[in-house]
Image (tube, rainbow, N blue to C red):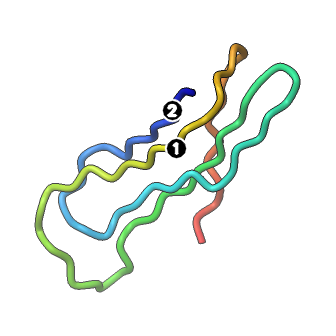
Amino acid sequence: MRCAVLFMGERGTAGHAIEITRVEWTDSSLAIHYRTRGPDPGALLAQALTQPFHVIRLPRVDGPVMFVESPSR
């Protein structure tokens, strides 16, 4: 088994997230779809450094892996 890990990087407040939404296998590649989210406008947020991430387990893939950003909700 392998893992796919997405990191959003360091953010200055709470309220940020990254999520793997779908994984698509083809004969020659793997596409990992993901979505990011920021805090709602006007939200009261903790002023703390955060580092959003998402980890999933996948079977081993020998072909190329593509990361595809899905539109935010």
Q: Give coordinates of residue 7: x percent, y percent.
A: 38, 42
Counting from the top left corner in percent of width and height, residue 32 is at 65, 40
Tell me what residue is drawn at x 49 percent, y 57 percent. Answer: 36
Pick the front one: 57 or 22:
57
Q: Is residue 29 left or right of residue 43?
A: right
Give percent across and percent down for residue 64: 69, 18
Q: Give the residue drawn at x 26%, y 50%.
A: 51
Q: Position of residue 49 (x, y in %)?
A: 15, 56
- Badge 1 local density, few (<14 within 10 Å), some, or many (20+)? few
Q: Are marks 2 and 1 in contact (CB under 8 Å)?
A: yes
Residue positioned 61% across, 35% down in the render:
58
Residue bearing the label numbered 2: 3
> Residue beneath label 1, please?
56
Q: Based on the displayed image, in which of its 4 quarters is residue 17 positioned?
A: bottom left
Quadrant of residue 44 in the image?
bottom left
Cα distance, mark 2 to mark 1?
6 Å
- Identify the amino acid type marked 1: Ile
